[in-house]
Image (cartoon, helix red, strand yellow):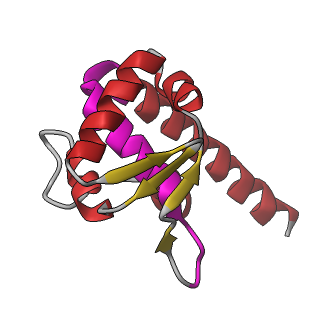
Amino acid sequence: LAEEVSNRFGKMLAGKMRSVFVSFEQMQMLPPRARVARRLVMMAADHQVDRPTLRRELLLSQEQLARMLSLSRQTVNEVLAGLEADGLIRRRRRVIELLDPDRLHKDGAEPGDAPGEIDVDPVDKSVDRV
């Protein structure tokens, strides 16, 4: 049992490290709008084993989002304004509501991604495969 727990823990840590490297790479390569859209979709994904869902409201300030993505608050504000103008989100004080998660998901796609496929949590897929 101890060996199985140790193996699972090691796989989880490796997956987390992979997730960090993927996030770092995305921060360097994707334009701000795609980075913001991708992060909002990732944060909204609720990975419950029995019923995966997507939360529609995120409690978060523009400043917090900017720090997560290494962007200025002004850039995040401009991106969010564009997403709101396109009908994808609604902004309220410290709340971002996802109005059209599917289109927001597409906005976060990288040029090489297959249609409709953003790996919102690379850790989940790597844990059982390793």
Position above or below: 19 against 50: above
* Image coords of residue 41 (percent x, y): 40, 53
Query: Would you say residue 29 sits in the magenta stretch?
Result: yes
At x 56%, y 67%, the residue is 47
Which segment did they paint magenta?
Answer: 25-50
At x 60%, y 74%, the residue is 48
Query: Would you say residue 19 sits in the magenta stretch?
Result: no
Name the image quarter holding residue 64. Answer: top right
Q: Which one is in front, 92 or 15? A: 92
* Image coords of residue 118 (percent x, y): 30, 53
User: Left or right of 19: which side holds 90?
Assistant: left
Q: Is residue 35 visible?
A: no
Q: Residue furthest right?
A: 2
Quadrant into which the N terminus falls: bottom right
* Image coords of residue 14 (percent x, y): 59, 42
User: Left or right of 57: which side holds 117?
Assistant: left
Position above or below: 20 against 50: above
Main SS category, magenta section: helix
* Image coords of residue 85 (percent x, y): 23, 44
Position above or below: 47 against 127: below
Q: Which one is in front, 105 or 62? A: 62
Total numbered badges shown on the rendered structure: 0
Q: Is residue 114 visible?
A: yes
At x 36%, y 44%, the residue is 38
